[in-house]
Image (cartoon, rainbow, N blue to C red):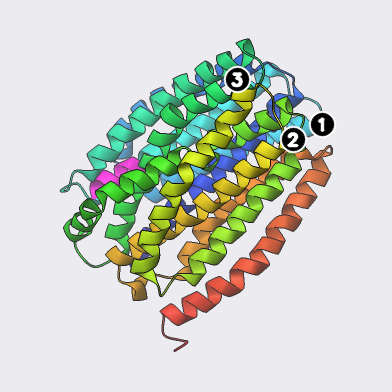
Amino acid sequence: MNHKNKSILSWFGESSGKELFTVASLFTVIHSIEVTTVEFSILRIIPEIIMFLTALVFTKLSHSKNVESTLFQGYALTGASYILIFILYIFGFLSFYSYILLLIFAVAGRAFVNFSRESYIQKVIPSEGIGKHYSLLYRVSTICEIFVPLLAGYIVEKTSGPFGLGLSGVIIFLFGTFPFLYQKSVITEKIETEIHSKASLKNGLQEIKKNTPLLFLTFTTLAFSSITAAYGTGYYILIADIYNLPAELIGLLISLGALSTLAFTYLVENRINKIYNISIFISCLLLPPTLLVTLLPNILNSGHLFFVVIHEILLGAIFVAISISGYTLRSKIIKPEKMQSVTVARSFLGSLTIPTTTLFYGFLSFWIGVINSLVLISVLSFLIIPIAAYGYRRSTGAIA
């Protein structure tokens, strides 16, 4: 594998974690300047439309530019914008208009990243048509990002209480999360298959095609677990607000699910076929009770901590099952000896961003939140790094 592919692949794996962090952070800022849910939804629409238009223009220019440098510029622009937002926020200078202006720059950076990545995909695998398929899915998910938050925000605002929250959650699940996850997971899986293995993409696609029914069930189940998508973090912050629950409690529950996912993923390396089928079965089996627990507060017209705890336990179990199935499916397509646990561990760092950002929101002090988040990340890193190092050494033959 050459250096360029390594760089591009690392951006693929890390982008979801960055998005989760920035969206959760923006909810924190929005909460501090006290805008309504509808106003926040409108704020989301403005930059998304600008991002879409910027990206369309950029698509015409990207073919003549170096993909790696453009990706770096996009991330730099987005990161600098968010950092400036926080600097203004900390010193009390963040106004409504400065927030809008900086958010426009941030999403313009995202547009550079997304469309330069899309251009790269079309160059790498044009013959199989995956680039075109990815492009279509990206546009669909972008349209969903424009309209779904507005609709969900309007419902929460006009129908206060658990019913409105539940209804908006269903809308987000169906129209916001599923296109996002299908685009990020299924298509990226095919791309990684091409980049990681020396086998032809055609063979990898045939293997995926054989498992299409199971894949559909798996990713449909995952779609109902919207906490894995950017909206999920904000959705749970809304739960904390409406039910008067400490956000750090929800964050700790999620972190247990993330740690379980990492542990189970490591344990199943040599039990691929059997665990794959079992994990698919478990994830599908857990879907009905999870949905029931989600709907119970709406049916009873009341929100209780009990429902949130049970819901988180079920979601944690689904995350474990689905993560195992995704890992084992990739291992079936790519020979296990080519799988490096370092790559697996790095991808889970993105999922571990969820509890840290939720914890970050829950603390009263900005700096206390930052310190606690860094401590949690450090503790989790101490758990991940030895596992990743051992797996890497074993995959390269350093350990028999």
- 113 magenta-colored: no
Return the x and y of residue 390 as percentages of the image width and height: 53, 78
Q: Nearer the viewer, residue 2 or 223?
A: 223
Residue extending furthest bottom? 400
146 versus 90 height, above or below:
above
- In what quadrant of the picture does the C terminus appear? bottom left
Secondary structure mostly taken by the magenta-highlighted segment of the chain: helix
Check whether the beta carbons of the residues at disc 2 and disc 3 lie within 8 A of each other.
Answer: no
Q: Tell me if 360 is positioned left or right of 129 in this view.
A: right
Q: In this figure, which residue is indicated by the disc labeled 3? A: 163
Q: Mark 2: which secondary structure?
A: helix
Q: Residue 192: name its quadrant.
A: bottom left
Check whether the beta carbons of the residues at disc 1 and disc 2 lie within 8 A of each other.
Answer: yes
Amino acid type shown at disc 1: Phe
Return the x and y of residue 292 as percentages of the image width and height: 53, 35
Q: Nearer the viewer, residue 97 or 70?
A: 97
User: Which of disc 3 and disc 2 is earlier in sequence?
Assistant: 2
Q: In this figure, which residue is indicated by the disc labeled 1? A: 91
Q: Mark 3: which secondary structure?
A: helix
Return the x and y of residue 135 as percentages of the image width and height: 29, 36
How many tags in the picture? 3
26 versus 400 height, above or below:
above
**Which numbered tag is attached to residue 171?**
none
Determine the CA span between mark 1 and mark 3.
Answer: 38 Å
Q: In this figure, which residue is indicated by the disc labeled 2? A: 87
Q: Which residues are magenta?
A: 117-123
Instruction: Say if residue 81 shows up in the picture.
Output: no
Q: Tell me if 75 is positioned left or right of 181 in this view.
A: right
Q: Mark 1: which secondary structure?
A: loop
- Residue at point 39% right, 54% down? 281
